[in-house]
Image (spheres, rainbow, N blue to C red):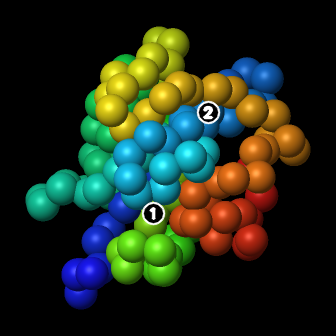
């Protein structure tokens, strides 16, 4: 267990059918849970730059930068592995491309979900966000 607080980003991408894109995690952190594209902020990045980069790296989608809007922040402590994150949650409705699994070691698949019928096994940061926010 490390005593470091990391900054994470998650981007809820919505399609024209009001569905949200979620990926099934394969990496040790959050394995078997669903979450939107995202990851760690890198040194020197703005919040939005981190969101754009992570989405591109994980899905191949290109987001329109002006359409990426911060919707909330959560303080997430993962008891199972001792990790602690401050997570920035963004919404975006304007993008180009079709989602592809770009990091097969981290994500099994991407799937669109109706915002009213999300899978139950969401990543902790997303569960925390959805306690106080609606998609």
Give the residue at x 61% y 33%: 21
Of all residues, the one furthest to the right in this rendering is: 116
Question: How packed is label 1: few (under 14 Cα within 10 Å), some, or many (20 or more)?
Answer: many
**Residue highlighted by disc 2:** 21
- In this picture, is 29 found above or below 114? below
- In this picture, is 31 found above or below 134? above
Q: Nearer the viewer, residue 128 or 96?
A: 128
Quadrant placement of the N terminus? bottom left
Q: Secondary structure at mark 1?
A: strand
**Residue highlighted by disc 1:** 88
Q: Secondary structure at mark 2?
A: strand
The nearer-to-camera label among 1 and 2 is 2
Question: How packed is label 2: few (under 14 Cα within 10 Å), some, or many (20 or more)?
Answer: many
Q: Looking at the picture, how far across and down is residue 4, in whole percent?
A: 23, 81
Say whether residue 114 is left or right of residue 33. Answer: right
Give the residue at x 69% y 53%: 121
Say whether residue 121 is left or right of residue 37. Answer: right
Give the residue at x 57% y 57%: 123
Q: Looking at the picture, how far across and down is residue 9, in whole percent?
A: 40, 56
Q: Looking at the picture, how far across and down is residue 72, in whole percent?
A: 56, 67
Of all residues, the one furthest to the left in this rendering is: 44
Say whether residue 41 is left or right of residue 60. Answer: left
Q: Quadrant of residue 125?
A: bottom right
């Amino acid at each position: 267990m490390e005593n470091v607080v990391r900054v994470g980003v998650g981007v809820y991408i919505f399609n024209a059918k009001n569905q949200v894109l979620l990926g099934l995690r394969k990496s040790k952190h959050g394995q078997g849970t669903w979450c939107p594209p995202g990851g760690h902020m890198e040194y020197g990045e703005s919040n939005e730059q981190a969101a754009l980069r992570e989405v591109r790296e994980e899905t191949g989608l290109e987001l329109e930068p002006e359409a990426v809007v911060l919707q909330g922040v959560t303080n997430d402590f993962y008891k199972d592995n001792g990790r602690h994150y401050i997570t920035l949650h963004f919404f975006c409705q304007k993008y180009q491309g079709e989602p592809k699994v770009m990091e097969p070691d981290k994500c099994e698949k991407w799937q669109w979900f109706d915002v009213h019928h999300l899978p139950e096994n969401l990543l902790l940061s997303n569960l925390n966000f959805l306690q106080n926010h609606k998609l």
